[in-house]
Amino acid sequence: MSEEISENAEFVNQHYLDKVMDLAEEKDIAATEDIFNARGMKLIAKGAKISRSVQEKLIMHKLKKPLEACIAVEGGVDIQKIVAEAQRIASENESVGCLLTATSSAGSSPFDILEKSYLGNAMSLMLTIIESGGPSAMSHCVMVSLVSICLARKLGLDVSEQAALAIAGLLHDIGEIYIQPEYLDPKRRLLPQEWGHVIVHPRVGQLLISQHGDYSPAVALAVSEHHERCDGSGYPRQTFQKNISIPGQILAVAEMVSGTFVEQDKPLERADLAMKIVPGEHARALVSIISDVTRVPHSSFVSPVDNRPEEAHQRTHMLSNCIDLAQKIGQNLSEEQKLRSKKALDLLAHAMERINIIQRAFISTGLNVCLLEDAAEDARIFFELDVASREIQWRLRDAGRELFLRASALDVQEAEFFQPWIALLDGNK
C-alpha cells in the first residue's frame, strides 16, 4: 500500500533554492528538523548542513513541509544587525535624519520599535539572502522600514501598528527572491511581456509572510499593497484608496521616497516632487508629511555631474511627442470601431483616461512651458524639469506594461489592435 501524500506537499521554488545554495557556500545553513518528502521518506536529517550535495534531492521531490519552515542560517541577519543599520542610515543620510526629527514624539523611538521586532528562521534567512545580493539591497529594506515607522508616528498610529509596519518594511521585497534573477537586473530594461513576472512579487511576499511569519495580518496585507496607488494605477491589483489599508498606503510611500533618499541631488525635494506629479496617487496626508519635511531648512548636495539640462530637454520633447501620438492612437481606435467586446472597449476607455491623466500631469508640472523656454541657465527650473520628466517617463512605461497585461486577456485579434499603443508607450526613452 502506498504512503499517504500530504495535501500541502509542494516542490521547492527553484530560484529560492538556488539562492539558498549560493548562500550556503558563505554561511552555515542547517535543517532545523527532519525533512521528508510528500510520501514520508526522510530526505535530510535534523542538524544536517544544507549544501549542493542535497540540492538534487530537494528539487526532485515534493516536500511534506515547505523547505522555508525547515532550515535556518547561522550568523545571518538578525534584529541587532537591523537596528545597527538603521542607526547608521539615520546618522549618514540627511533626508532620513530630517524625517526622524520632523516626526519625533514622546514614547518609543523607531529604533525601539525595530529592537522589539521578531524575525524567525524563515524571514531571517530571506533577509540574509537579500543582504548577500549587496549592501544597498539590505539598506533599502531597512530604510523603508525606518521611513514607514516615521510616517506611521506622524499619522498617530499606535505602537502595534508601527511595529507591523517595521516588519512590513523589512520584508516588503522578499517576494523578489522567488523571481528569475534576470528579470531583476537593474541594468536590464524589461519588455512589457516580461513585466508580468515581476509584478507578482508583492503577492508572493504576502503568501510567504502569511505562511512563515508569526505576525499580525496587517503585515502581509501591507506587503501585498506596497506597489498599489490610491488612484488605481498601481499593481498587482490596481486597487483604489478605499480598498488599500492605511499600513499599505504608508508602505507604498515609504518604498517610493526611500528610492529618492539615496540620490545626491536634492533627495527630499525629489521625493516631494515625485509624489505630486500625478495628483491622487498617494494619500494627501502622506504627501503633506513629505512636503512639510522638505520645507524645513537643510543642506542639499547637488552633483555637477548630473547637471545635463540638454538631456532633460530632449527627454521632455520626446515625452510630449509620445503623449500626443498616444492620444491620437487611442482616438483612432475609438473612431475606427474595430473593437467589439465590452472588455476591449472598457480597456480602451481605461487606457485613454490614463494617458489623459499623464498629459494633465505633464502640463501641471510646467513641462509644456519648458518646451518653449530655455531653462538651461536656471538651476531650479532644470532640477524640476529633470525630476518631472523622469517621473512622467516612468508613468508612460507603466501604462504600456499595464495595457499589455490587460490586452493579453482579450481575443487575439482585438489584442493586436493595442500593440502599436503598447510599443509606443514602452518605447519612450
Image: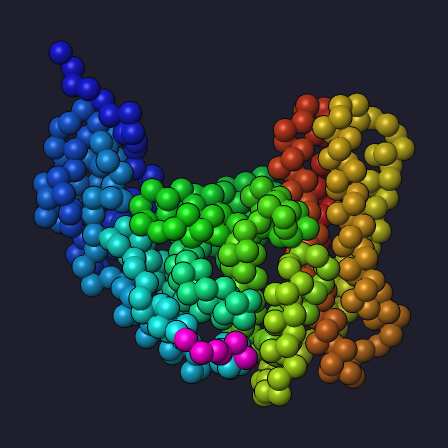
Q: Place residue 145 in its image quadrant.
A: bottom left
The part of the chain drawn in magenta is: 102-107
Foreground residue among 63 and 335: 63
Taking the spot 40% from the left edge, 61% from the top edge, the residue there is: 160
Residue 82, percent across and down?
Answer: 33, 68
Residue 398, percent across and down?
Answer: 65, 49
Residue 271, percent across and down?
Answer: 62, 70
Foreground residue among 278 and 62: 278
Foreground residue among 208 and 158: 158
Q: In this view, does 399 lie above or below 371?
A: above
Residue 149, percent across and down?
Answer: 46, 67
Is 113 magenta? The answer is no
Residue at the farthest top position: 1
Provide the major secondary structure of the magenta segment.
Answer: loop
Foreground residue among 158 and 408: 158
Taking the spot 68% from the left edge, 45% from the top edge, the residue there is: 400
Is 105 magenta? The answer is yes
Can the viewer see residue 170? no
Left-right relation of 292 to 6: right
Q: Which quarter of the figure is the C terminus placed in?
A: bottom right
Q: Which quarter of the figure is the N terminus placed in?
A: top left
Can the viewer see residue 413? yes
Total numbered labels placed on residues in the image: 0
Taking the spot 33% from the left edge, 58% from the top edge, the residue there is: 127
Q: Is residue 335 above or below residue 271?
A: above
